[in-house]
Image: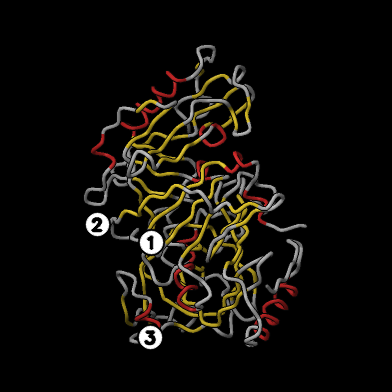
């Protein structure tokens, strides 16, 4: 396998050089290129969003993107200084417009000003937006150069990668320096994994997300393509021995048709079933059910579910643990951590099992993902109660996903869960082969 390595301090000239070299060598039939791409992911300390970097345009520049599982495409702010000699709007009735067969596509002449990226007539439009501000709009589809990947894999380039050219107001409340949203939606031909698989036969419609809590370095990773997915020192295939559950369709929803939903049949705390209102666990007219989100910081539970989970968690805590007044309005249950010992999977608190479509398919959440230290000697249950009248009853957030591998198999329409990698004494940060 041919490999290029470059450090996070490499400048843009190194980035461009790798892109040009790959263009040359990829034409040689004797070269065997990898079937898995690696995208480093950082966690922004201010917004708690997960950020990755993808190269785009001519001349090529690195662009910061917020990772969003449910977005249907790569969204880029084209209103604030988008300059590229290879930008091409996707025209009405073109092959590209037909290929981007996402729901609610429109075609026509909507631009009243001088043509520019994001504002051209006779172009193909789609509906997409920013989940953080829950705002969606029609926007121009376009093509441009894309360069994606990092060590220990190589940089892969696509000269005509379709993306959504969005207006600046959609990009509010993103992390500082971020000008786009990286969409990994399953029900869209132009999401990052699906489009890469369609453009290059080396890649399969699979990807894995392994997030980290660290905000000091590029410590998380997204794998795109075939398994195995390795971490190193020692070398472990973390894509083995996963618990799989089928994707659940949410056909009623309008703007979030590429989100990932799963069936949750019950929740157990310390091995005991929590008495849930089971009607909230199914999707009805677009409401209820369970969604997985990388743009939600902590798991959100419908207030009815949160209240019984909170009570069950309190009852399962050791008797010498004192409940305290929450020092922050974000969390509804906090307690003294003075008598909580630490383990290799975080604070020794009652385990939480999310039981999927059958009893044997459950995802165990340990203390490292179930509680958060908010100040000295005070921990809080890292779940949020909220009246989810227009949203899922359960929205699994980023904090609960950290140091777990989630494998999204878009071919078999299922998701695999690993539980905490700390059980294997490894981490999402060890995706770089250093030896």
Between 218 and 363, the residue placed more toward the observer is: 363
Instruction: Note whether residue 74 is visible.
Output: no
Against 66, residue 145 (above or below) is below
The residue carrying pointer 3 sits among few (fewer than 14), some (14 to 19) or many (20 or more) residues within 10 Å by Cα, namely: few
To which quarter of the image does residue 98 belong?
Answer: bottom left
Quarter of the image containing the C terminus?
bottom right
> CB under 8 Å between callouts 3 and 1?
no
Residue 62 coordinates in the image, percent (x, y): 64, 69
Residue corresponding to mark 2: 252
Residue 85, by quadrant, is bottom right
Give the residue pinned by disc 1: 412
Nearer to us: label 2 or label 1: 1
Residue 95: give its label: 3
Instruction: Give the CA distance from mark 2 to mark 3.
Output: 28 Å
Residue occupying the far top of the picture = 320
10 Å neighbourhood of mark 1: few (<14), some, or many (≥20)?
Answer: few
Residue displayed at 39% across by 43% down: 361
Q: Nearer the viewer, mark 3 or mark 1?
A: 1
Who's the residue at 62% across and 81% down the image?
A: 58
Labels 3 and 1: the sequence-earlier one: 3
Secondary element under disc 3, as helix, strand or loop, is helix
Residue 86: quarter of image: bottom right
Q: Nearer the viewer, residue 432 or 84?
A: 432
Mark before the other along the chain sequence, 2 or 1: 2
């Amino acid at each position: 396998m041919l490999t290029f390595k470059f450090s996070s301090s490499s400048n843009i000239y190194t980035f461009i050089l790798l892109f040009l070299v790959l263009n040359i060598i990829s034409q040689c039939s004797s070269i065997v290129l990898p079937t898995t791409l690696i995208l480093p992911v950082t966690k922004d300390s201010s917004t708690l969003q997960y950020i990755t970097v993808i190269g785009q345009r001519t001349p090529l520049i690195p662009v910061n993107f917020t990772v969003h599982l449910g977005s249907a495409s790569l969204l880029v702010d084209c209103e604030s200084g988008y300059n590229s000699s290879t930008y091409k709007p996707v025209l009405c009735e073109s092959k590209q417009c037909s290929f981007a067969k996402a729901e609610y596509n429109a075609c026509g002449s909507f631009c009243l000003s001088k043509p520019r990226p994001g504002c051209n007539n006779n172009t193909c439009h789609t509906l997409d937006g920013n989940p953080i501000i829950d705002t969606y709009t029609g926007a121009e589809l376009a093509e441009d150069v894309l360069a994606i990947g990092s060590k220990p894999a190589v940089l892969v380039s696509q000269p005509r990668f379709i993306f959504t050219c969005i207006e600046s107001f959609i990009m509010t409340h993103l992390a500082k320096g971020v000008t786009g949203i990286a969409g990994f939606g399953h029900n869209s031909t132009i999401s990052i994994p699906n489009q890469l698989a369609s453009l290059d036969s080396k890649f399969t419609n699979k990807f894995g997300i392994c997030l980290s809590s660290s905000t000091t370095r590029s410590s998380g990773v997204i794998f795109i393509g075939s398994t195995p997915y390795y971490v190193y020192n020692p070398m472990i295939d973390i894509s083995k021995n996963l618990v799989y559950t089928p994707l659940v369709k949410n056909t009623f929803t309008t703007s979030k048709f590429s989100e990932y939903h799963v069936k949750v049949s019950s929740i157990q705390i310390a091995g005991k079933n929590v008495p849930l209102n089971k009607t909230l666990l199914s999707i009805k007219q677009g409401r209820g059910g369970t969604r997985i989100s990388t743009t939600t910081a902590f798991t959100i539970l419908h207030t009815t579910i949160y209240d019984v989970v909170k009570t069950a968690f309190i009852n399962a805590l050791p008797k010498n643990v004192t409940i305290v007044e929450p020092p922050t309005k974000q969390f509804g249950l906090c307690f003294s951590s003075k008598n909580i010992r630490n383990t290799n999977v975080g604070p020794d608190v009652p385990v939480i099992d999310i039981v999927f479509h059958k009893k044997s398919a459950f995802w165990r959440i340990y203390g490292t993902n179930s509680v958060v230290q908010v100040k000295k000697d005070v921990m809080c249950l890292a779940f949020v109660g909220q009246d989810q009248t227009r949203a899922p009853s359960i929205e699994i957030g980023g904090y609960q996903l950290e140091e777990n591998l989630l494998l999204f198999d878009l071919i078999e329409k299922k998701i695999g869960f690993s539980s905490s990698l700390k059980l294997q004494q490894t981490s999402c940060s060890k995706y770089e082969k250093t030896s």
